[in-house]
């Protein structure tokens, strides 16, 4: 994977959506891991749409359950172990 977007705050969606779209246009492979209250970025329709072109998108299950209680998760839920694996696979990490 060329780039991993690591989202940790809700406001990150405003930057991550156009960044993900630009990565896709450039032919880069990219993924995303959302943690802390950054999981709420999945409420942003533009960001969620951009994620359709990502290689892999996952959220911290604990963070999802804490900040998005009762809502259906549109992406893979997992542990911080997935976060670590994605970091290891990425050539570059952009933390937002």
Image: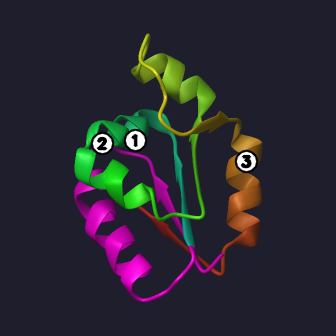
The residue shown at (67%, 73%) is 90
Above or below for 75 versus 61:
below
Identify the secondary structure beneath mark 2.
loop
- Structural crowding at the residue carrying mark 2, measured as other residues with C-alpha within 10 Å and reported as few (<14), some (14–19) or many (≥20): some
Is 48 on the left or on the right of 88, as rendered?
left
Q: Residue 26 placed where, x, y %? A: 42, 89
Q: Which residue is mark 3?
A: 82
Callouts 2 and 1 close, C-beta under 8 Å: yes
Identify the secondary structure beneath mark 1.
helix
Between discs 3 and 2, the one toward the N terminus = 2
Quadrant in which the N terminus appears: bottom right
- Structural crowding at the residue carrying mark 1, measured as other residues with C-alpha within 10 Å and reported as few (<14), some (14–19) or many (≥20): many
The residue segment tinted magenta is 1-29
Kindly report the distance in space between the C-alpha atoms of the residues bearing marks 1 and 3: 16 Å
Q: Which residue is mark 1?
A: 38
Which residue is at the front of the view, 91 or 72? 72
Is 13 on the left or on the right of 76, as rendered?
left
Identify the secondary structure beneath mark 3.
helix
**For residue 39, which quarter of the picture?**
top left
Residue 36 colored in magenta in the image: no
Residue 3 colored in magenta in the image: yes
For this orientation, the residue located farthest to the bottom is: 26
Q: Residue 95 placed where, x, y %? A: 46, 63
Q: Residue 20 placed where, x, y %? A: 38, 69
Kindly report the distance in space between the C-alpha atoms of the residues bearing marks 2 and 1: 5 Å
């Amino acid at each position: 994977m060329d780039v991993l977007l690591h989202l940790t705050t809700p406001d990150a969606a405003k930057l991550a959506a156009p960044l993900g779209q630009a990565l896709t246009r450039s032919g880069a492979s990219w993924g995303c891991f959302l943690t802390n209250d950054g999981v709420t970025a999945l409420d942003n329709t533009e960001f969620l749409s951009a994620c359709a072109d990502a290689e892999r998108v996952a959220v911290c299950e604990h963070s999802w359950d804490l900040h998005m209680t009762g809502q259906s998760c549109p992406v893979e839920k997992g542990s911080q172990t997935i976060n670590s694996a994605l970091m290891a696979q990425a050539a570059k990490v952009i933390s937002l």
